[in-house]
Image (cartoon, rainbow, N blue to C red):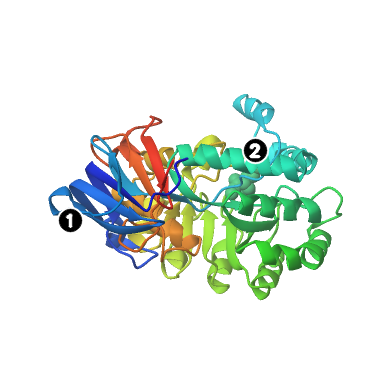
Amino acid sequence: MTPAPARLLLRDLAQLATPARAAAPLRGPALGEVVVLEDAFVLCAGETIEALGRMRDLPALDGDVVELDCRGLCAIPGLVDCHTHAAFGGDRVDEFSLRAGGASYEELHVAGGGILATVRATRAAGEDGLRAAVELHRSWMLREGTTTFESKSGYGLDRETELASLRAIRAAGGVPTWLGAHAVPPEFADADAYLDFALAEVLPEAATIAEAADVFLERGAFDARQARRYLEACRDAGLALRLHGDQFTEAGAIPLAVELAARSVDHLEATGEGGIEALAASDVVGVLLPASALFLDRPMPPARALVDAGAAIALATDFNPGSAFCESLPLVCSLAATQLHLSPAEALAACTVNAAHVVGRADRIGRLAPGYRADVTLLDAPDWRYLAYHLGGRVVARGVVGGELR
Ligand code: NIG
Ligand code: FE
């Protein structure tokens, strides 16, 4: 890491590409509007973008300026991963191998594997182990161009480990979300008894660390009544609301998200026409996680229908050890183009400006514009659309985070 110089000039960029509009969340045709400048520069002053434009319009700069030769590179906004589960111990590579042999994700969960296997490993990791894990996962994400990440807790499900997870996420610079309702841990008889505990014993302190709360509303996890109880308590404690919904079944996540004015409802692989219409008529963002659908060999979410109906969407990795061991937003953009039928421009906006909205930061990250934070991802490509085009390739050259070259 190079400490932020007073000014950093990214010069001679093959292209600079940024979502055109700031009015997040973008939807409809605005989602696909990208400004592309050829032969461009970005000038960073401290942590902020001071100016950008075509090289021929670069003003004479006095004083100390560090210059980076960006010939052959493209600049896009630092990518924003608005849905990850980075705070976990252990792995699920054995389960992955079983699934490759035909076992289903839901069967493994019912048999005490799945999320609960990671709960055991996460409780055993301790706070230092969790801090090291989140830091490692953050470094993987940065290598893939992610300069801001959200991460959920949800693999502790006891007071100590949930709070340690949230602190570890914050310590690594992530945006913490309390996923206190992810699964019912084995020491509780049922979901209601667990929620009695979580809301009384964990929420008061979780609300001082986290920015949002999330719930897994699904058959075998929490039902709509329990999700409402959890989310209303979290809202009253000052947290923004998110939901995991319609991953396997439609169990009321979209109506609840709309009613409670949640920031987002995430997954949507099982969403039908009614859900598409309801989401499109609301301000709730649909966060699409195609790497998770791919990893579990599930249907892809109806992304094209959502966008065409006017819904606001974002894209994220869902990085976690069970359903999406994938930290790469460029790969997610490739899936968006090939499987979700989004244009590269729509995919870019979905994991920059719209994802920034989902984490409550659209006023300062997610676009390249003067006054925004100097978070820039440099692509090793002659055209910015290689972000989606280079399937599984090493498309990210390096990043600038708050004006610091990484
Ligand atoms: O978003 N669906 C629920 N939670 C995670 C997966 C958790 C896991 O399998 O460990 C998800 O897919
Ligand atoms: Fe998730």
Tell me whether the residue at label 2 lies in contact with that at label 1, contact meaning CB atoms closer than 8 angstroms: no
Q: Is residue 43 visible?
A: yes
| The residue at label 2 has a CB less than 8 Å from ligand 1 | yes
Residue located farthest toward the front when viewing the structure as drawn? 63
Q: Which residue lies furthest to the left in this view?
A: 56
Quarter that holds the C terminus: top left
> Would you place residue 76 above or below residue 234 in this image?
above
Which structural element holds mark 1?
loop
* 87 to the left or right of 52: right
Q: Residues within 10 Å of mark 2 (few under 14, many from 20)?
A: some
The crowding category of the residue bearing disc 1, from other C-alpha atoms within 10 Å (few below 14, some 14 to 19, many at least 20), is: few
- Real-space Cα separation, disc 2 to disc 1, in angstroms: 57 Å
- Indicate the position of residue 58 as horizontal and vertical percent values: 18, 53
Res 122 quadrant in image: top right
Q: Going 37% across and 35% down the picture, which residue do you hit? A: 397
Q: Can residue 339 be seen in this view?
A: no
Question: In terms of depth relative to the viewer, which is nearer, 374 or 292?
Answer: 374
Whole-percent x and y of residue 301? 46, 49
Answer with mark 2 or mark 1, whichever residue precedes in sequence: 1
Kind of element beneath mark 2: helix
- Asked if 254 appears above or below 261 in the picture, the reply is above
Q: Classify mark 1 as within 8 Å of ligand 2 or not, answering yes or no.
A: no
Residue 256 screen position, x and y as percent: 59, 68
Q: In this view, does 166 lie above or below 68?
A: below
Which residue in the protein does label 2 denote?
105
Q: Mark 1 points at which residue?
A: 59
Q: In this view, does 362 lie to the left or right of 379?
A: right
Question: Amino acid type of disc 2?
Answer: Tyr
What residue is rendered at 77% in x and 43% in y? Answer: 126
Residue at the spot 63% in from the left edge and 24% down from the top edge = 101
Q: Looking at the image, which is closer to me, 298 or 83?
A: 83
